[in-house]
Amino acid sequence: QVQLVESGGGLVQAGGSLRLSCAASGRTYTMGWFRQAPGKEREFVAGTSWSSGNKYYAESVKGRFTISRDNAKNTVYLQMNSLKPEDTAVYYCAADLSAGPTGPYNYWGQGTQVTVSS
């Protein structure tokens, strides 16, 4: 069983930046980020394989968000730049032991709120 703990959410003005972190309790193969805005379904944001050779991004965040990982720390990061109000959501970290970067994921964090004010 893998436990994930996110941190780094908060309130930021449009155009600003935030960095989310997610620490896993053990080694994982694939790690990613999803988000869920009020009244909407959870959606994929970004994912990366163990080697970081394969990274995938949702079209809505390409060029603005960057996913990275530190395998020595079992931690994945999401650097979010040029934030927009529509990026406001609860962001969830996800991990799996064998899936590709887009999932499916079996392990989930508790979520961290990101709010972007206009």
Image (cartoon, rainbow, N blue to C red):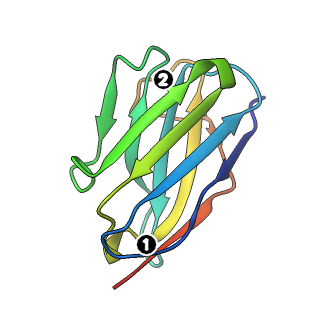
Estimate how packed mark 2 is, as few (under 14), some (14 to 19) or many (20 or more) residues with alpha carbons within 10 Å: some
Which numbered disc, 2 or 1, marks the residue that appears first in the sequence?
Answer: 1
Residue depicted at 47% across the width and 69% down the height: 89
Res 99 label: 2
Measured in 3D between alpha carbons, the distance from the residue under mark 2 to the one under mark 1, in whole angstroms, is: 27 Å
Q: Residue 4 location in percent, x, y? A: 70, 41
Is the C-beta separation of discs 2 and 1 under 8 Å? no
Q: Secondary structure at mark 1?
A: loop
Residue 88: quarter of image: bottom left
Residue depicted at 59% across the width and 45% down the height: 21
Residue depicted at 42% across the width and 48% down the height: 79
Q: Residue furthest front?
A: 16
Q: Nearer the viewer, residue 40 or 63?
A: 63
Q: Which residue is mark 1?
A: 88
- The amino acid type found where label 2 is placed reads Ala
Number of labelled discs? 2
Q: Is residue 25 above or below residue 35?
A: above
Q: Residue 45 location in percent, x, y? A: 38, 49
Q: Is residue 57 above or below residue 82?
A: above
Quadrant in which the C terminus appears? bottom left
Residue 103 in sight in this render: no
- The amino acid type found where label 1 is placed reads Thr
